[in-house]
Amino acid sequence: MTEGCEFRDLYDQYDALGVSIVGVSFDSPAENKLFSFNNSFQYELWTDAERELALHYGAASFAQQPFATRHTVVLDDYGRWILTYAGVGNTVQHPNDVLADLTAIFSQ
């Protein structure tokens, strides 16, 4: 929960850069909707029950994997993959690190 809340708290700064945030989990749409509501997320949470996104972006190794590895993937406006943060460990600091990197990239 901490990582999602950190992205929530930094949402306006991401938005000022023109960056959209989307969360993805293996939970059902109903679970994601409730989780998003309970945490006042301004961004969407997508359900990846079949693990298609997780497998494509490396957050899962196999389709029956019960939990995703925490990854952040940054795509440009055309859907091209430009940054990956694989195996995120420090979920409190991570959203700040991503924001700093994107500020450096998009403020040029």
Image (cartoon, rainbow, N blue to C red):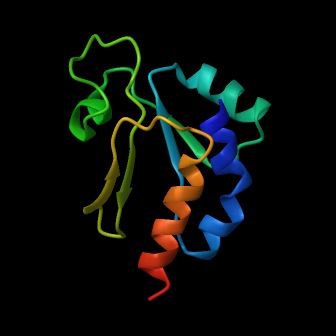
Question: Left of 50 or right of it: where is 9?
Answer: right
Front one among 5 and 79? 5
* Residue 17 horizontal/vertical position (percent): 56, 75
Quadrant assignment for the C terminus: bottom left
Relative height, residue 37 to residue 106 (above, below)? above
Question: Left of 58 or right of it: where is 89?
Answer: right
For the point 68% across and 27% down, which residue is it?
Answer: 35
Question: Left of 75 or right of it: where is 20?
Answer: right
Relative height, residue 14 to residue 67 (above, below)? below
For the point 69% across and 49% down, which residue is it?
Answer: 8
Quadrant assignment for the N terminus: top right
Relative height, residue 37 to residue 76 (above, below)? above
Front one among 74 and 101? 101
* Residue 78 horizontal/vertical position (percent): 29, 68
Question: Left of 79 or right of it: where is 105?
Answer: right
For the point 62% across and 39% down, which residue is it?
Answer: 4
Q: Is residue 82 visible?
A: yes
Q: Is residue 42 visible?
A: no
Relative height, residue 100 to residue 40 (above, below)? below
* Residue 59 horizontal/vertical position (percent): 32, 32
